[in-house]
Amino acid sequence: MAEEKKVYSRTKGIIEGAVSGFCPGCMHSTVHKIIGEAAEELGALDKLVRVEGVGCCGLGQFYVTCDETIAAHGRAGAVATGIKRSSPDSLVYTYQGDGDLAAIGLAETLSAANRGENFTVIFVNNGIYGMTGGQMAPTTLVGMKATTAPKGRDPQEHGYPMHMSEIINQLTAPYYIERVSCDTPQHVIKARNAIKKAFKYQMEGRGYSIVEIVTSCPTNWGLDTLKSLDFLREKMFEEYPLGVFRDKGAEEK
Amino acid sequence: MAERVFMKGTEAIAEAAVRAGCRFFAGYPITPQNEIPEYMARRLPEVGGTFVQGESEVASVNMLYGAASTGIRAMSSSSSCGISLYSEGVSYCASARIPMVYVNVQRGGPGIGAIQPAQQDYMQATKASGNGGFRMIVLAPDSVQECVDMVYEAYDLAERDQNPVLVLTDGVMGTMMEPVVLPPMKSDEELAECRAKFMPRAIVGHPLGQQAYCRPGSVGDGQEQANIEAAALYETWDKDIRVEEFMMDDAEIVFAAYGISARISRAVVRELRAQGVKAGMIRPITISPFPYDTFRNLDFDRIKGIIDVEMSIPAQMRWDIDFAVQGRCPIKEVLRSGGQLLTNDQVMKGAQEFIKEVL
Amino acid sequence: MARIEITTEACKSCSYCVISCPKKCLEIGSDVNSKGYLYAVSARPEDCIGCAMCAQICPESAIEVWR
C-alpha cells in the first residue's frame, strides 16, 4: 500500500488554531483562506501586505498572519497606493466589501484603478452591509430587503445595483478583472486561481487587478446557509455574472 | 552643505522636506499651497521619490498614512478647507502612532472661505485635528526660514514620538520670497538608519511570526490602553515648548501673536519702543504644546495688558492666553480674518487705543 | 486509504462540506462543540476517496485531507 500523503493542509496564511469571527456559512472566511493559499503557493507570504477595509472584513485582522494595516472606511485604494509606491517589493492587496469599495470608497477605488496602481483588489460582494446590520448597499438587488430599504430596493428611489467589475472594465489601465464565487469546491478553486493570477501579475509589475467575489450573507439575507446558496446562484449570479472581464496577460500570450 | 538662496515659502517648504528625506508626497490642488505639490512633482523623481496627485484631500492623506506606515519619510500639504478633509487620516495616524508630517498653508474660512491668507485654523490645529481627542506637536513658523527649519525638524519629532506633526503656516509665508539657508541633504545612509528603527512595525511584509500590524483601533481594552500610552506621551512635551520672548525684560504692554501676526507685531513693538512705550511680545513657536507657563508666570504687577493679535475673527489663540492669564490683566484683541491682512497701522492703532486705557 | 480530519472546534455547521462530498461521506453529527455548533462528522469514512472537495469548500479551514 502506498504511503499516505497529506493532500490538503490548512494554510499558514491564517493564524494556527484560530477560528474566524465570521458567521456560519459566510464566505469571507473562505476568501481569507484562499488568499493565504494563493500567496503560499507563490512563496510570497512574507511579502504579503493586507490593507483592510471597514465592515465585516475587519474581522480578518484577528485571523490572518500577514502584515496588515486598517484603512479608514473606503480608503483602502488610497492607503494601498501609499504603501505599494513606497514599498514596491511588497505584495499588496486590499480587502473590501461592497459598502467600502462601491459606496464610500468609490472615488478611491476608481482612481486607483484608473492610475493602474500595481496592487490587487479583493472585492467581496454580498449585496448588503453585514457588520452594521443589513443596510442597503450599492450592490443590493432590486426588490431585496434591507434594514434601510424595508420594502426592498426600489429603483425609483434607490437606483439600480452597481456592477463594479463592469464599471472598472470601462477604464483603460486595469490589467486583470475577474468575477468569481465560492459556492462550490470548483468555484473555490477557480477563485483561488484568480487571486493567485492577480498576485502573480502584481509580482511581475503589470498593474491593477481586481478579483470580485460574489458571496452570500446568510445572516443579513435572513436565510439558512444552504438556502443562501440557492439565492446566491439564482439571484446574485443573474445580476453579477461570473467570468473574466479582462486579462491582458492572456491576451498577450 | 547648507546653502543660501532666495525662495518662495511653499517651494522652500517642499525643498526642505526633500532634504529631510521625504520620498513620497501625495496632495490635491488647493490655493495657496499649489507650489508645494508642483515642486514635488518635479523634484521627487530626481531623488528616487514618488509624487502622486490624489483624487481628493481624503485620498491624499490616506496615501500619506499608507506611505508613512512603510517607514519612509513622506509628506502632504493642503490649505484650511482641504485640511478639514485630512482629519480622517490624521486621526488614524495618531491612533495607530504613525509618524506623519503635514503642512497647512492657511487661508480664510470657514467653509471655502477665501484664498487669501488667514490664521483661522488655530483651534482645529491645536485642539481637534480629527476625532478622538488625540494631540500632536504643531509648529508655527513666522518666516520662510522657520518654515524650512521646522519642516526639516518635523520628521525627527514625528519619528521620536511616532505621532503626527503639523507645520501650521499661512498664505503670506507660503507666497512670499525670502532669503533662506537650506539645510543639508540627508544621506541615504542616514535615511536607512531612520527607517531601520521603524522596520519591525513597517507594513511591508514580514516572515511568519513577525507580523506587523498597523492598528488605528482596537477591541476590548486595547484602545483605552493605547489612549493611556498616548496621553503619557503628551505629558512629556513640556520640554518641547518653544516660545520667543521679544523685548520682554521690562515690558508693560505685551503683544501675543504667532506666525505672520507675530512678524507684524514685532515691527509695532519696535515702533512703540522708539516712542518710549515699554512694549514686548510673546510669540508661541509651538502652539501645541502651548507655552502656558510663559503667560502664567508674567509679572502682573508690571504688566498693564496683553494685546492678542490674530488673523482670525473671532479670536482663537485668545482662549489659550485666557486659560493662562486667568483675568489678571486686561486683554485686547486686534483681529482681521476672511483673507483680509493685518497691517502695521491697524495693529499700532489698536495698541495706542489700548495704551490710553491701561497706562 | 484516504481520510479526513475535522477540527470540530472550528466547525460552524454550515453543511457546505456535507453537500459537496461526491461520496456523501459527511453528515452533521449530533454533538455540539464549545461554541454550541453541531459539527460535521465523517459518517462513512470507508467511502472517502480523498478528493478534498470538503476541505476546499470549508470556509473555516477545519478539514485536512490525507490520501
Image: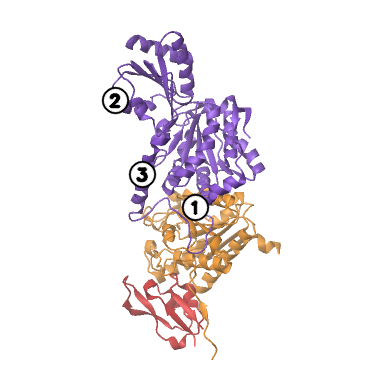
Chain colours: A orange, B purple, C red
> Residue B326, labelled with which disc?
2
The image quarter containing residue A224 is bottom left
Closer-to-camera residue (A175/A58)? A58
Q: Are marks 1 and 3 on the same chain?
A: no
The amino acid on which the numbered mark 2 sits, given as a three-letter code, is: Gln
The x and y percentages for residue A50 are: 50, 57
Q: Secondary structure at mark 1?
A: helix
The x and y percentages for residue A174 are: 62, 55
Q: Are marks 1 and 2 on the same chain?
A: no
Return the residue at label 1: A102
> Residue B232, labelled with which disc?
3
Q: Are marks 2 and 3 on the same chain?
A: yes
Identify the subunit bearing mark 2. B
Residue A241 appears in the picture as rendered: no
Closer-to-camera residue (B161/A142)? B161
Closer-to-camera residue (A26/B124)? B124
Q: Secondary structure at mark 3?
A: helix
The structure residue drawn at horizontal position 57% and vertical position 69%, both measured from the top left corner, is A41
- Mark 1 crowd level (few <14, some 14–19, many ≥20, 10 Å Cα): many
